Image (cartoon, rainbow, N blue to C red):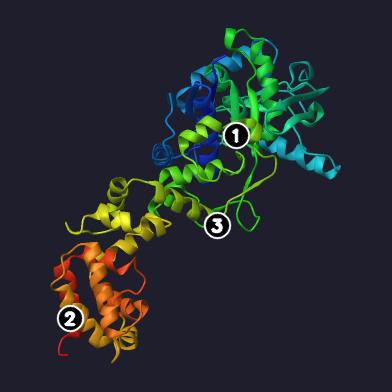
Amino acid sequence: MTVRTRFAPSPTGFLHIGGARTALYSWAYARRHGGAFVLRVEDTDLERSTRDSVQAILDGMRWLGLDWDEGPFFQMQRLARYREVAEELIARGFAYRCWMSREELEELRKQQIGKGLKPRYDGRWRPERSAGLKKPEGVNPVIRFRTPEEGEVGWHDLVKGPIRFPNGELDDLVLLRADGVPTYNFGVVVDDLDMAITHVIRGDDHVNNTPRQIHIFDALSRTGLFGERANLPAFAHLPMILGADGERLSKRHGAVSVMQYRDEGFLPEALVNTLARLGWSHGDDEVFSPQQFVGWFDLGHVSHSPARFDPEKALWTNQQHIKRAEDARLARLLEPFLETKDSPPLDRVVSLLKDRANSLRHLAESARMFYVYEEPAAAKLAELLNARTRPALRMLQARLAETPWERKALGAAVGAVLKQSGLTMPELAMPARLLVTGRTQTPSLDAVLELLGRETVLARLARHLQGD
Ligand code: GLU
């Protein structure tokens, strides 16, 4: 059997962390098993679906590297198919038309609540019960599914294990609305069959929909409309994602859109790594590539309990991936974050700084000192540039004017000044850093000097030591 999975987003917003995790697991499962990954856009909520959201979801998936083999398919372009299938269900006695109005439904609801019952449609338009009912004029009926009233329905969830529901808890759900648009449960089942999906991997907020969908699958497999493909897929329901505070992850927790992570300077592979760890583990492995993930991913190691999204850990993971990334690639990715000049070459700057950056934004922040001179804060300057350091910095200035410009020689020049002045390394290096970069936190002084270049270093030193 060829594995076929799908990601079926409703285009009502950005691709958020939860959706991206679902997409990632479905994609990885298909890739791991040499199968196909299908993208299907569930755009039947006409009020909330937008083209911008479709675009945002596709952009997010592309950025993460989640390539799909088929689609995107759009449910709103498949209305004729849902109609055809619904009519066939009616013809076979698995579904029926219902003319109950909104007001009547509301009335029924009130009565049931009044009696302390759970509100549910009472099946009054089932053909065998509707003899005395009058069809209203000029009203399009909905099509409802005839849900078995007795017995149970269940499945073996690949994440959660066996799950069962009594049929008595389910009512005759609407398949097709009066305007011909399918409900979520119907569209999903028709599509999962038409697209020959073998594994449905999705959030566990859909556990309650699954018994309804299984009933529809069963009925459809008996219509002959789907021929060979009428197999019930396996289901895997992924645990919920919580924020660091233990509440369900939402906008309140800051960045939840995948593209926001890109804009904040995440590498896509770092976000993939972070998403992968939300409810799945592979021994003690914390840092891994998308390729490794595909090689390891299985549903058996998806956790049963909610996952926690920790922004600090996400940044740490990003830092590990930045360290591993190639300098030239990082330099390219830094472009939107930083205005550079030809010199020093950005990839050399990146190579010096990347071990300490937890985002591209942070890396750009550190790299900026090589391209833009930041005037040191006056208070810092007053503190570090004093009667003890000033003569030593003058010595340094004089030596640097004659030192060959490469790291080793520069280090030796600094060493000679230490000896001559009697200062300690921090006593000399701190003010020197401040004068040449405007900062006191930098990589080692000789490396910084080398990259900045003689002209820049001497000009910056002179600027503050003038008039001595
Ligand atoms: N459109 C549904 C959602 O976004 C998909 C659920 C499913 O995968 O069946 O929640």
Mark 1 CB lies closer than 8 A to ligand 1: yes
- Crowd class of label 2 (few under 14; some 14 to 19; many from 20; radius 10 Å): few
Task: Name above or below for residue 10 compared with residue 330.
Answer: above
Q: Is residue 98 visible?
A: no
- Crowd class of label 1 (few under 14; some 14 to 19; many from 20; radius 10 Å): many
Front residue of this view, candidates 441 and 163: 441
Spatial distance from mark 2 to mark 3, Cα to Cα?
A: 46 Å
Q: Which residue is mark 3?
A: 253
Residue that appears at 83% across and 44% down:
114
- Indicate which disc, 2 or 1, sits on the residue closer to the N terminus: 1
Q: Secondary structure at mark 1?
A: strand
- In the picture, the quarter occupied by the C terminus is bottom left
Mark 3 CB lies closer than 8 A to ligand 1: no
Res. 29 image quadrant: top right
Res. 252 image quadrant: bottom right
**Residue 173 image position (x, y, % from top left):** 69, 28
